[in-house]
Amino acid sequence: MSSDQIALSTSRALEEQEDHGSNPTAGVSIGDIVAERLSRRDLGRGILAVFALDAVMPSLMPSPAAAAKVQAIRSFTFDEIAAGTDDMHHVAAGYDADVLIRWGDKVAGGAPDFEPAKLTAAAQGQQFGYNNDFIGFLPFDGKSDHGLLVVNHEYTSAEMMFAGLGGLDKEARVASATAERVGIEMMAHGGSVIEIKRTDAKWRVVDASRYARRITAETPMRMSGPAAGHVKMMTNADPSGTVVNGMVNNCAGATTPWGTWLTCEENINGYFWNKAALETHAEASALKRYGIPSEWYAWGKFHDRFDIGKEPNEAHRFGWVVEIDPFDPASTPVKRTALGRFKHEGAGNIINKDGRFVVYQGDDERFDYVYKFVTDAAVDLANPSANKNILDSGTLYVARFNADGSGAWLPLVHGVGPLIAANGFKDQGDVVIFARQAGDLVGATRMDRPEDVEANPKTNSVYVMLTNNNKRKDGQTDAANPRADNQFGHIIEINPDGGDHASTVFTWNILVKCGDPSVAAVGATFNPLTSSNGWFGMPDNCAVDGLGRLWVATDGNAPSKTGRSDGIWAMETDGAARGTSKLFFRVPSGAEMCGPCFTPDLETFFVAVQHPGEADDDDPKATPASFEAPSTRWPDFKPDVPPRPAVVAITKSGGGKIAV
Ligand code: FEO
Ligand code: CA
Ligand code: CA
């Protein structure tokens, strides 16, 4: 950490440390071939087709006739907003963007009012948690105006939540932690289930709903699948290796067609303590491959299970996809270990044409992998409870992207290829617990931080958000990760062979390389019809709406980095407008954009504003932000209330479908 980073915001400090590129393998190194292939291929699919019609080749500037033609076929009907940064959120004209629920608002019926100067663990355990990320909407009886909203609370930012920590660097903030503060942090993690209803065109949280529920870092959970009961999952508190308390760093996720919530543990390394114990740990190299322990939080000072010297296996019990049934408030969340253990971003999914369920997953770390899981059984839509344990049996695969635009899903199955006892994999439990090392052995492609991966049910194309990788050097580029020092990220489109998501082969191409297209050195490839507001960097989360249109949420845009805040961009994927994007919504200063989620009728778009009020961490001259001195007090704008992460419901003024 350099001196000008002394008081980095929690979100950036975590990213800088977590994101150290712990994958040591050479992986697939592909080389030069590609830039040329990609530019030909990308252009051929989109703009050139249109320009050629108007005989404007070889110029890439559209003629007025071509521009009109492209405009006409664009699929998103809204006027984009200006990119920029200020202390408010902004949405396209003709839309309302209303705060639905904020950090500290009541979830459980008896929850106390939010008192920012008097936080307690007991109150926080009943109130909406911090740093909302994934949002899922589960309708009652298919209704789009009444349902359950499930929301992840990814992590806590002590300097923004608690008074008196401004000016301390990250280590000093951690060192100052008390048991009481740790208790509040643990209760502010996890997720929330709330019942919401739309009446008189406005969404409201239903008070004292029987479904209202907080999941925290202490909620009892069950393990299922190949790692449940495994020797490396056993602890002093749980000699059975089958039960665990809590989930942490739940980033993105998904809902399932049978009405459950998949919530994904991402940067688990930061919760574990005791770097001094690492070298004598029996699994030291395995822990290092996951960056454990990183000591971002002081939980291990007060809770033995987060101290790797005291509980050597506890870290193996985190880093999973957790399935929760929000319609049964008494249900026990289940960590589905068959889907592998890594820094899960999300769990984008689709029912394959043969009925099996396919979950796409990114491992958000520099040089880590893209995965998918294919169930053995077909989904039974007529009988939702029949799918209760469908995620326990299936095949986990990791992706290899070849230079010629083909790709392969490599099975991570014990006994197949190198995944044998001689290489440290005694059973499938070892394979899923150490999924990263399994991916290393089979030769997966090392990616530029895979975030959300979402399938489009209308086209069967799959979109992979690769957010950035400033550690990739010249000579380490490959076809799928073609830029060294990839500051702005890119989006890959995967096309499963024959539209079969269970197939082990696919083709792929790059939808867009992100960043400012007006700076040649950046090498961005947005469709030239994209306006100066319409380009973005750092794609993170995404959603495919009911019309098969792609919406991209970003993390990392800031005034000093891209001259704009994070937001939601509508991204054309097909036809002549492919590669064009438009800005629909932007966050208040210091925030990142998470959770894009539509109701089935496409009339409401829920988005999550995470960590509002932080400083511009890319600007060395920016004043560090804190509880006392945030960059915005959104959404309350009261002098004694800090900024609060919140869910925003976007609707069309007067009703109607979004961007139609
Ligand atoms: Fe939690 Fe990869 O973002
Ligand atoms: Ca994310
Ligand atoms: Ca993020």
Image: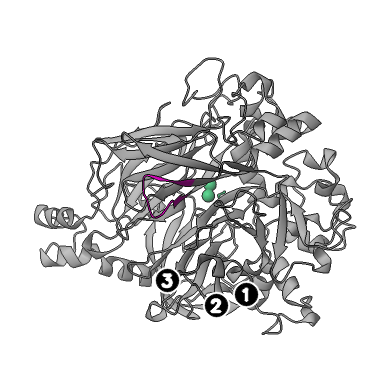
What is the crowding at mark 2: few (fewer than 14 residues within 10 Å), some, or many (at least 20)?
some
Distance from mark 2 CB to nearest ligand 2 atom below 8 Å:
no
The answer to whether marks 1 and 2 mark residues whose Cβ atoms lie closer than 8 Å is yes
Question: Which residue is nearer to you in this view: 257 or 540?
Answer: 257
Q: Nearer the viewer, mark 2 or mark 3?
A: 2
Instruction: State the image coordinates of residue 477 (x, y, percent, origin top left).
Output: 52, 65
Compared to residue 417, the image places residue 399 above or below, namely: above
Q: CA distance from mark 1 to mark 2?
A: 8 Å
Residue 28 quadrant: bottom right
Q: Residue at x 48, y 76 (%)?
A: 402
Question: Which residue is nearer to you in this view: 359 or 516?
Answer: 359
Q: Secondary structure at mark 3?
A: helix
Q: Mark 3 or mark 1, which has the lower sequence index?
A: 3
Compared to residue 588, the image places residue 493 above or below, namely: below
In this picture, which residue range is highlighted in magenta? 137-148
Residue with the mark numbered 3: 34
The quarter of the image holding the N terminus is top right
Q: Residue furthest top?
A: 639
Q: Amino acid at mark 3?
A: Val
Compared to residue 355, the image places residue 548 above or below, namely: above
Distance from mark 1 CB to nearest ligand 1 atom below 8 Å:
no
Residue with the mark numbered 2: 377
Drawn side of residue 321 relative to residue 257, left or right? right
